[in-house]
Image (spheres, grey):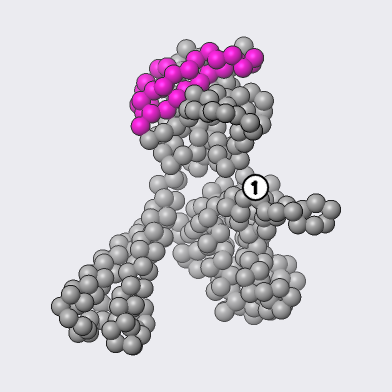
Amino acid sequence: MTLYCGIDLHSNNHVVCVIDDKDQRVLEKKLDNDPELTIRTLSRYKKRLQAIAIESTFNWYWLADALKEAGHQVELVNTAKVVQYSGLKRTNDRYDAFHLAHLMRLGILPTGYIYPKAARGLRDLLRKRIQLVQDRSSHLIRFKFQVQMHTGQSIRSDRIKTNKFQLPVIGDANVQLALQSHLAMIRALTVQIKILEKSILSQVEPVASFNWLKTTPGIGDILAEAILLETGDIARFKAPGNFASYCRCVDSRRESNGKKKGENNRKNGNRYLAWAFIEAANFAIRHNEKAKRFYLKKEKATNAIVARKALAHKLARGCYWVMRKQQAFNQDRVFG
């Protein structure tokens, strides 16, 4: 008899539910977040388990890795696509774990990609670099705001980020201390960002796809790193349209009889790839004539936002073939 397992995962515990092919509960237990305890609990069912479904929460790494290393088949659940039965009066952790196992038994469990453990650390290091850049931008904006508020003058961000920049005497001692604090954080973050960039580049530079991606208009080292590491195995996408959708470059809309009836989940996909291709579109508009012509033509027919998104979509489809075929970006084919 085949068994199916669902795990409802939380920050300090998880509920395990194992069912048979008639939806009868074989095991239902709340466990502490201890991988050895979970493996021991499921060991007696291991040979009959089809797979173990784990919610894609913020802390799934440890559990999925431990179960895979113990020889279990693990499915990472795409929680954004899981639909509960309508009309339910009450649900809880026990029901949620059962529901995941039930969907697996029916063959309709929506699953996500389990990024390989060996490469996961590098991808997360890139995400940390993005976070540090955002933090630095936040301090830059507040620094410039305070200077402009007290002097009416604006200072360029690239000037502030240089070590040669001298803090002007502005306002009283309290204002000066606040500016010094912002400047100290900007410089500290800049140092850490450079350290991370150097480490990431040294690890991705030997990868062929990384250099091919840089032949794409608007894509340099940082964006090529983001696209390469966030994509993972390009073969998991059957067609360029699937990849563009994962990059959130496809319009989310619901239509019937040629009319728009609403929108679907716009946030379905990878937000880091969405950011990367919008940034690539911005740079391509400024530095590539064919991309600029495509953008201006689309902008004239629609608006700037739609045109930029359309260009990002074009770049995403082109990058799919770059990574799939390990070849340079073909501008003539993409832009016509």
Q: Position of residue 206 (x, y in %)?
A: 47, 57
How many numbered marks does the figure carry? 1
Give the residue at the far left of this rendering: 173
Residue 312 or 323: which is nearer the viewer? 312
Asked whether, in this view, residue 44 is left or right of residue 295, the answer is left
| Residue bearing mark 1 | 237
Q: Vertical placement of 196 versus 101: above or below?
A: below
**Which residue is farthest front?**
89
Residue 182 versus residue 329: which sits nearer the camera?
182
Where is residue 78? Give x, y as percent: 56, 39
Which residue shows up at 55% across the image and 32% down it?
75
The magenta span reads 12-41
Q: Residue at x 41, y 22 (%)?
A: 30
Snapshot quadrant of residue 252:
bottom right
Q: Regarding mark 1 in the picture, which secondary structure is present there?
A: loop
- Does the magenta segment cover residue 71? no
